[in-house]
Image (cartoon, rainbow, N blue to C red):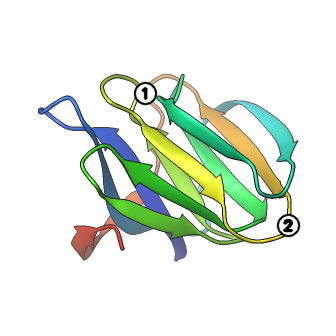
């Protein structure tokens, strides 16, 4: 299993985080893949994700926060399942000296994400 975090919009309109994993060796119906790099020490204020997608961190360590005070840290090799398309959104900031290199994998409509929540489910 590959460590993952799911950002989603709850019934309260706020973004929330659920900790889990992505089942390995599964094929995901993807529409596109995009690679991006952001300079070290960067951050992004409140925003939502535009489409359902994986964000796979290749380098850099980031701290994500929600308006409700939930937070989690992404490390290289972690997967973010971004599904908080409405509501209060989230922020992120790079917390190490590396650039954030990542791959965005946009799902085809209705694609299975293979996200498996942890027993506790909450972020850290």
Tell me if I can see residue 69 in this picture.
yes
Q: Is residue 103 left or right of residue 16?
A: right
Q: Is residue 112 left or right of residue 77?
A: left
**Residue beneath disc 2:** 98
Up/down of 34 relative to 39, above or below:
above
Q: Could you tell me residue 46's position as x and y percent?
A: 48, 33
**Residue beneath disc 1:** 110
Q: Quadrant of residue 5?
A: bottom left
Q: Could you tell me residue 122's position as x and y percent?
A: 26, 67
Q: Crowding at label 2, few (<14), some or many (≥20) Cα neighbours within 10 Å? A: some
- For mark 1, give the secondary structure: loop
Which of 82 and 64 lies nearest the eye of the viewer? 64
Q: Could you tell me residue 79's position as x and y percent?
A: 58, 60
* Residue found 31% across the figure and 43% down from its top: 67
Q: Could you tell me residue 41's position as x and y percent?
A: 77, 57
Q: Which mark is residue 6?
A: none
Q: Is the residue under label 1 in contact with that under label 2 (CB below 8 Å)?
A: no
- For mark 2, give the secondary structure: loop
Up/down of 54 relative to 53, above or below:
below
Which of 112 and 95 lies nearest the eye of the viewer? 95
Tell me if I can see residue 22 in this picture.
no
* Residue found 19% across the figure and 37% down from its top: 10
Q: Quadrant of residue 59?
A: bottom right
Q: Nearer the viewer, mark 2 or mark 1?
A: 2
Up/down of 112 relative to 3, above or below:
above
Q: Crowding at label 1, few (<14), some or many (≥20) Cα neighbours within 10 Å? A: few
Farthest-out residue, left: 12
* Residue found 39% across the figure and 62% down from its top: 71
């Amino acid at each position: 299993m590959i460590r993952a975090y799911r950002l989603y919009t709850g019934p309260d309109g706020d973004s929330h985080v659920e900790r889990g994993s992505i089942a390995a060796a599964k094929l995901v119906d993807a529409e596109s893949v995009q690679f991006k790099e952001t300079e070290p020490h960067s951050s992004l204020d409140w925003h939502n994700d535009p489409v359902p997608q994986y964000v796979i961190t290749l380098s850099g360590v980031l701290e994500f926060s929600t308006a409700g005070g939930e937070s989690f840290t992404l490390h290289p090799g972690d997967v973010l399942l971004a599904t908080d398309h409405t509501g209060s959104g989230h922020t992120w900031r790079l917390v190490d000296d590396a650039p954030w290199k990542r791959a965005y994998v946009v799902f085809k409509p209705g694609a299975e994400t293979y996200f498996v929540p942890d027993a506790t489910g909450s972020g850290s």
